[in-house]
Image (cartoon, rainbow, N blue to C red):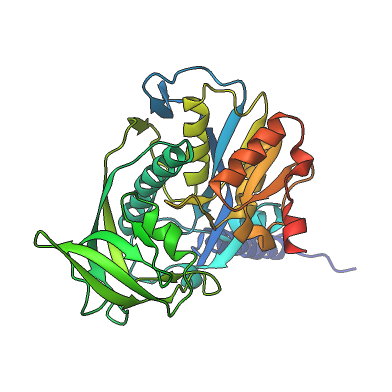
Amino acid sequence: MEKTSQPNRLKRALQWLVLIVVAVGLGLAVSLTPLPFVIYSPGPTFDVLGDQDGQPLIEIRGSDEPAEGELRMVTVSEEGGPGTTVTAPMLLRAWRTPGYSISRYSDVYPDDVTSEDMEAVSSAQMESSHSTAAVAALEYLGYRLPTVITVVGIAEDSGAAGKIEVGDQLVSIETPDGTVYPMKSPSAPFRLLRDVPAGTELQVTVERGGRDRTESVITTEDPADPEQGSKLGVVLSFDIDMPVEINFHLENVGGPSAGMMFALGIIDKINGGTLVGDNVIAGTGAMHYDGTVEPIGGIEQKMYGAFRDGAEWFLAPTSNCDEVPGNYPDGLEVRAVGTLSEAVDAVQKIAAGRGDEVPTCESVVG
């Protein structure tokens, strides 16, 4: 029997060692190589009735009664967007974890966008959500909000082009039946136009150079909701005389989707902190001046984050209901709301032990 010499055994051992080192190196290289994907996961949640860094998240002078329960706004965490990277192990974890989702980078972001660009947009959206939530909540509570509405932009292909000018102040709108609607509140133009079909001729009165003038404007289809309402084709700014001072204290969180929960928090605080009872209710939805709860992104991640942080109930925009069935954790009660009024009603019913009376997304989708 031949015996393998000591040098041959050493040579083979060295060969195996080299192969192992190469394999480990390749594995490390693969695991550390940035991949063109974006991962979305459940982010932190915040009780809008509570404190943040020692200050009330929503501060309203004279409205400091402690709440019994919680109203939690929800967020989505992102990895792989501008300024961050995703690796193979991260993708594997996301693929295997409920409440996570993966998108191709190119489907989400253009190549030239920066993290600074996204932060600026996100911060502006959060600031806007503060304003719309405050307006919607105060109008719901019956406050008058005297407002000067000014035209700051005009769509070139709209019926307003060549008739309405930048700088005009909106005074009133007359519908074909002869009803004149004063434009004296932030919600006034939106509430009206949601019930006006595209192609309707309206008489729009504006103040220009100190004088009123009336122009005939034919409305156009609203791309966001082509089956209902229409648009004038103008961009408006609002100078609002707010009757109540409302401040928000929340750092490093952006986006528009907390508007509904902010509005509910304002209503609860002004009403003495009794709206929620001892329940933990989370929810999401962008808030419009006219009280409409608008769709948002990342609802699956938000539902999982809410449940993780103790929420028993979750309010979802009706317009997101097709994304809800089968995509939330067992034990979370998800209910559909389309307006701020419906959201308040839902919270009141939940507090009264009648949450089963609030429509589910499954019943909305059919």
Q: Is residue 170 above or below residue 56?
A: below
Report whether residue 311 is seen. no
Front residue of this view, candidates 324 and 186:
186
Residue name at image x 43 percent, y 55 percent: 84
Front residue of this view, candidates 77 and 361:
361
User: In the drawing, does residue 167 fall left or right of residue 12?
Assistant: left
Q: Quadrant of the N terminus?
A: bottom right
Residue 48 image point, x, y percent:
50, 32
Q: Quadrant of the C terminus?
A: bottom right
User: In the drawing, does residue 287 fall left or right of residue 302?
Assistant: left
Residue 152 image point, x, y percent:
22, 63
User: In the drawing, does residue 242 fall left or right of residue 213?
Assistant: right
Q: Is residue 149 above or below residue 282?
A: below
Residue name at image x 49 percent, y 51 percent: 286
Residue 95 image point, x, y percent:
68, 59
Total marks drawn? Answer: 0
Residue name at image x 23 percent, y 70 percent: 214
Q: Is residue 51 above or below residue 160?
A: above
